[in-house]
Amino acid sequence: MHSRNVALAVSVLLLPFSVLAQSAFEVTSVKRNTTGSFGWSITYTADSLRATNATLAALIQSAYGIQLDERLVGGPSWVRTARFDVNGKAAQALPREQLRAMAQRLLEQRFGVALTREQREQEVYALRVAGGDGRTGPDLRRAADDCLETGERTVLKSSTGATPTFSGWCATMAGIATGLSRNLGLAVVDQTGLPGRWDFVLAYTPLVPDASPVAGQTNLPTVFVAAEEQLGLKLERNARGSVEYVIIAKADVPKEN
């Protein structure tokens, strides 16, 4: 079992991006979904948010970019069980970041969501440059200088087919570390010191919760070996680091429309 003892917890107000954006969807709709289905989706188009059969917890994670379920805690039990269909329509096409800010405001207005955040000291994996000389592997490449200006955004994908991969483009090292956390079940903290944006593809054998390879998939290296061989990065366990947790301080069952 991974240690989850908390040595430090400092709570501060989590200011929503919508306070800064001062914008909201022109039209919104919130309805309870009672189909009993487990499938759900949250998607953004150029000018809208569309969520089907999603829990409030999932909506918060999407709007605030919380990539790991365990990093969102607190709140009444229904935020992880009740399902909703939520739609927001903007007056025009907008950047994805602004749509997410508008989604945050929708959650504040329709669900009464209020969040705080805590920095908790705990066991983590440290992501570092292998050898410490700053060199990277063949499958980790500098992203184009204009990847943000040309409309590209950080995109991280995980596939679980015959050749499981974790890939991304225009990604920061902090983003890559967060993505790796999903496979390891423990926080990964960026300690590479590598600035800028990166493109990469990492092929590896997925791990089960005790950090051992999945049975029957021995043709690929573990994520530990793959990260060093393919990206020139190494994952070191038994490090200590500060990990952010988001706490649901308040949430109300919404009125439907």
Image: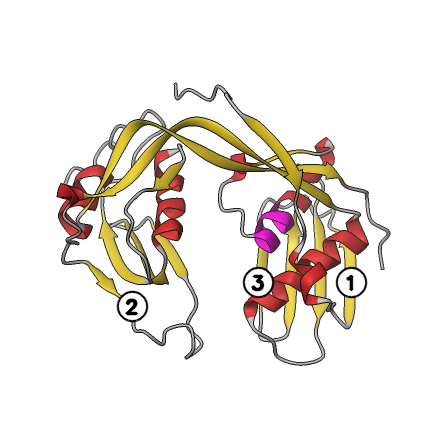
Residue at image mark 2: 143
The residue shown at (28%, 53%) is 194
> Disc 2 on helix, strand or loop?
loop
* Amino acid found under the numbered disc labelled 3: Thr
- Name the one closer to the observer, 103 or 175: 175
> Residue 10 falls in which quadrant of the image?
top right
Secondary structure of the magenta portion, mostly?
helix
- Quick one: 201 or 4, which is closer to the camera? 4
Extent of the magenta region: 58-64
Q: Between residues 105 and 34, which one lies in front from this camera angle?
A: 105
Give residue 204's position: percent from left, percent from top.
Answer: 22, 45
Given contact means CB atoms under 8 Å apart, are the residues at marks 3 and 2 in contact?
Answer: no
Residue assigned mark 3:
43
- Front label number (1 vs 2): 2
Where is residue 53 drawn, in percent x and y?
A: 66, 51
Q: Is residue 245 above or below residue 39?
A: above
Q: Which residue is mark 1?
A: 29
Counting from the top left corner in percent of width and height, residue 49 is at 64, 65
